[in-house]
Amino acid sequence: MTSREKTGFLPRMAEDADRPLGDRLFTIAWGAIQWPWLARSLWGGRLADKQALLDHLELPYDALPNLGSWKADTWFLWQIVEAVERLRPEHVVELGCGASSLVLARALQRSGGGELTSYDQHADFVVQTGEWLASHGLGATMRHAPIVPGPNRWSYSWYDLSGVPAEIDLLVIDGPPWALGPFGRGNAERLFSRIRPGGMVLLDDGARPGERVVASRWRRDWPDFDWRFAQGAKGTLIGERRG
């Protein structure tokens, strides 16, 4: 969740109540390890860069009034725009909606179309984001994906996804929040088999230690993707499927 409005230091964690104590303690321990990267995640980027992005997308400056505080930063938003303009994707799937949803929808509109399906664990936020996009003449398929238990090698819980496109050209991973588990975003690999040859994966916060573990395993387990790390305040892991 990357709200249009200002948010607090801690992400909303309504799904945390049923997690086992051991899983919570494991996450706290990793938080102690990666706190410098978590602090960096709170920075949204320079105002000049945000204005340049909005100029490029031909959006008003108040379209993205508040970045930072767990939102996608300007660097990652630029990575999204560049991917859309290069790939001209037909189907984009996003995990964790908000500021990135607006940028994705506008970039798709400017590139000639394409369908965005965006998921978030907070039902009210899904509705608000859809209304926000509509206020700028943009549209997307907004879906509520609650966090549900399902212990696996990555985390204790993950999104309950529905209506995922059979084929994906661009997968943008900006959720769930790290406080649900430092490796939780690794579960996004469940969608990799749907990514078309030539398609792309973008993982936000790629510089965090938890995401680096995820990246190392993805490189090992998904050799049909070319993986690279793009520098930035928070880093972006980029994977492109060969073929």
Image (tube, rainbow, N blue to C red):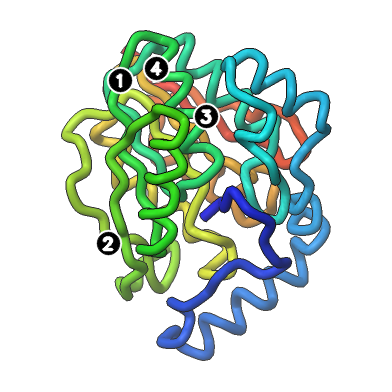
Q: Label 1 crowding class (10 Å Cα cut-off): few <14, some 14-19, many 20+?
A: some
Badge 4 element: helix
Give the residue at mark 2: 160
Residue shown at 46%/17% (left/top)? Answer: 84
Badge 1 element: loop
Amino acid type assigned to the residue bearing label 1 in the image: Gly
Amino acid type assigned to the residue bearing label 3 in the image: Val
Residue shown at 69%/76% (left/top)? Answer: 29
Q: Label 4 crowding class (10 Å Cα cut-off): few <14, some 14-19, many 20+?
A: some
Q: Measured from the top left, where is residue 39 in percent x and y?
A: 80, 57
Residue 169 sits in quarter = top left
Q: Marks 2 and 3, how far apart in space?
A: 24 Å
In the picture shown, does residue 88 fall above or below 80?
above
Earlier in the chain: of badge 3 and badge 1, it is 3
Find residue 114 and name its label: 1
Q: Measured from the top left, where is residue 152 in percent x and y?
A: 35, 67
4 vs 1, front mark = 4
Find residue 109 and name its label: 4
Residue shown at 58%/62% (left/top)? Answer: 178
Q: Marks 3 and 4, how far apart in space?
A: 10 Å
Q: Are marks 4 and 2 in contact (CB under 8 Å)?
A: no
Earlier in the chain: of badge 2 and badge 3, it is 3
* Observer-nearest of 134 and 126: 134
Q: Marks 2 and 1, how far apart in space?
A: 24 Å
